[in-house]
Amino acid sequence: MRYTIEQANAVLPQVRAVLLQLAVEQRRVDEAHTELHRSLSGNGNVSPADEARQETEVAGLREGIRGLLMHLDRLAVEVRDLEMGLVDFPGERDGQPVWLCWRLSDPAVAFWHTNEEGYSSRKPW
């Protein structure tokens, strides 16, 4: 699939929502992982049931993240940098394949770069 700039902007609310949810879920994974390590490195009084519960929680959160990433993959949206909220949509410009470049702080998809370039080379549409 190749997006036009209009198609990319039309799906943008969905992509934005997924990226925001990914940020929330990643924060939850980080917190749960930290808590698990804190429990395990503590005084050794963590019950096997509590340890198993924490491990299950972390695994469930990671599975949720995988599901969100798969959703973006089904949309043919390439995640480039999760922390920045940077994604590329496959597109075309002057008959050549390009990436339509967007990051979470951008109001709309309005930049592009060639397939050989990256974010630092993006240009206004």
Image: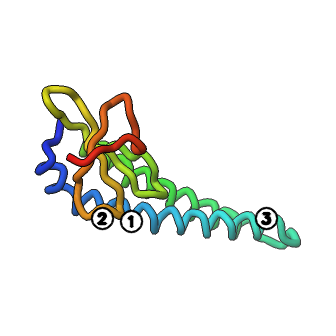
Residue 125 versus residue 93 in the image, above or below: below
Q: Is mark 1 on a helix, strand or loop?
A: helix
- On residue 21, which mark appears? 1
Q: Which residue is drawn at 70% across and 66% down?
A: 36
User: Label 3 crowding class (10 Å Cα cut-off): few <14, some 14-19, many 20+?
Assistant: some
Inter-mark Cα distance, 2 to 1? 6 Å
Query: Which of 38/105 is in front?
Result: 105
Left or right: 41 in relation to 67: right
The amino acid beneath tag 2 is: Ala
Q: Which of marks 1 and 3 is in front?
A: 1
Instruction: Give amino acid for label 3.
Output: Leu
Residue underneath mark 2: 17
Q: Are marks 2 and 1 in contact (CB under 8 Å)?
A: yes
Q: Which numbered circle lies on residue 40? A: 3
SS state under label 3: helix
C-alpha span from label 1 to label 3: 28 Å
Cα distance, mark 3 to mark 2?
Answer: 34 Å
User: Considering only order in the chain, which callout, 3 or 1, is on the residue closer to the N terminus?
Assistant: 1
Residue found at the very far right of the displayed protein: 43
Residue at 40% from the left image edge and 38% from the top image edge: 118
The residue located at (23%, 59%) in the rendering is 108
Residue 101: percent from left, percent from top: 30, 47
Q: Residue 86: x, y in percent?
A: 39, 52
Label at residue 55 = none
